[in-house]
């Protein structure tokens, strides 16, 4: 019997039959897709779809849901393709083809002035050849972790003895009066970076303003001003190492940037060490039960990789970051 494929935005009619497929994804989210936190339960997922916070394209085979694609257009200036999943990961290449075609059709209007970004986590990296057929490009991303317990991350960190800062430099923590300076510094540091390819907000000060605003206003995660390091040169901010917290336990470095004229002098390591020291102290005294600090960088950014390794970070896994201009 021939199979009838139909890819479409999910509707109320599919909610009941879709539940087992969605729960199959939830069961695999941490191990196979490297999710740090549990995805929404099914009730929460359906609620988010109804409120149009996320959109879901489902693939029906003879009217039975077998695969889906989730995306959003509401968080950043990009169309964010979050996940492609099929039941038991079977025939994912062929099924993804139908889903991506429908996705590109549904987002045709948004894509006139927005890029598409797609972190191909876990098993999704097997779709790289399929995504290339739709003219996606790729950047290699590596995830690094500094574990508070169970590894030698802290032992490596404690071996680092920073040089004293020159007299005209100081490090302090975040204060809202540094916001405008942060926008300028981060825009300069990132406007020509690979990050700007899949988040074009970095290309302008207006877009960078939106990114910094969402960080410090807890939109992405809980902002940690006390662990965010600011490098001052003669009292003027020239570098920022932002820190936030997801799920109450996982610290993350969302942005880390320094103006060009102050790069190559060891300040990045001093800033990062200052933030790590505060997080370690917080975890050890039990003020917050922080289990790790994580970050990402490009697989070919050898300078950044060397910096993180020297302070105790270890490379966990890598994935292709796909983007469609």
Image: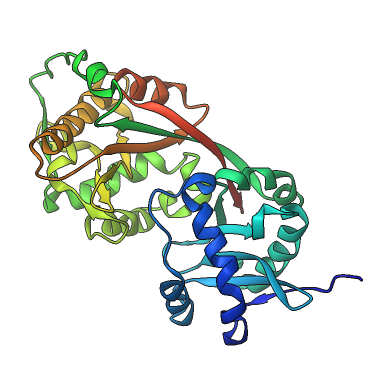
Eyeballing the image, is 159 above or below 279? above
Visible residue check, residue 157: yes
How far across and down, in percent of the image, does residue 310 sit?
Answer: 32, 18
Quadrant of the rendering where the N terminus is positioned: bottom right
Name the one closer to the observer, 155 or 191.
155
Question: Is residue 281 rendered to the left or right of residue 129?
Answer: left
Q: Position of residue 47 (x, y in %)?
A: 43, 79
189 up-or-down from 40: above or below:
above
Q: In this rendering, would 206 be left or right of 136?
A: left
Q: Residue 237: image x %, image y %?
A: 17, 38
Q: What residue is rendered at 28% in x and 37% in y?
A: 292
On screen, residue 23 above or below 149: below
Identify which residue is drawn at 62% across, 48% down: 124
Residue 147, percent from left and from top: 29, 31
Q: Name the quadrant of the C terminus.
A: bottom right
At 67% from the left edge and 53% from the top edge, which residue is drawn?
A: 89
């Amino acid at each position: 019997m021939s199979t009838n494929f139909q890819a479409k935005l999910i509707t109320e009619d599919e909610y009941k039959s879709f539940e087992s497929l969605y729960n199959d994804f939830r069961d695999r989210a941490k191990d196979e897709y490297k999710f740090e936190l549990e995805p929404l339960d099914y009730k929460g997922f359906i609620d988010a779809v109804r409120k149009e916070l996320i959109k879901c394209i489902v693939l029906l085979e003879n009217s039975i849901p077998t695969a889906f694609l989730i995306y959003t257009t509401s968080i950043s200036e990009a169309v964010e393709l979050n996940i492609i999943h099929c039941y038991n990961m079977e025939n994912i290449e062929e099924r993804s083809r139908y889903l991506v075609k429908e996705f590109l059709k549904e987002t045709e209007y948004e894509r006139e002035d927005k890029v598409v970004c797609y972190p191909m986590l876990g098993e999704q990296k097997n779709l790289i050849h399929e995504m290339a057929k739709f003219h996606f490009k790729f950047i290699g991303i590596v995830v690094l972790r500094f574990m508070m317990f169970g590894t030698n991350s802290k032992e490596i960190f404690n071996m680092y003895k920073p040089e004293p800062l020159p007299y005209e430099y100081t490090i302090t923590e975040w204060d809202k009066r540094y916001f405008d300076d942060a926008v300028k510094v981060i825009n300069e540091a990132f406007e020509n970076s690979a990050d700007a390819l899949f988040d074009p907000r970095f290309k302008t000060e207006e877009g960078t303003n939106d990114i910094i605003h969402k960080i410090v206003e807890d939109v992405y995660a809980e902002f940690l001003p006390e662990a965010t390091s600011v490098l001052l040169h003669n009292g003027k901010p020239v570098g920022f190492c932002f820190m936030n917290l997801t799920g109450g336990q996982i610290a993350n470095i969302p942005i880390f940037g320094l103006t060009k004229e102050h790069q190559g002098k060891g300040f990045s390591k001093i800033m990062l060490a200052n933030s790590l020291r505060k997080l370690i102290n917080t975890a050890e005294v039990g003020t917050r039960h922080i289990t790790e600090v994580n970050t990402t960088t490009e697989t070919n950014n050898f300078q950044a990789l060397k910096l993180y390794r020297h302070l105790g970070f270890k490379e966990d896994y890598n994935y292709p970051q796909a983007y469609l201009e």
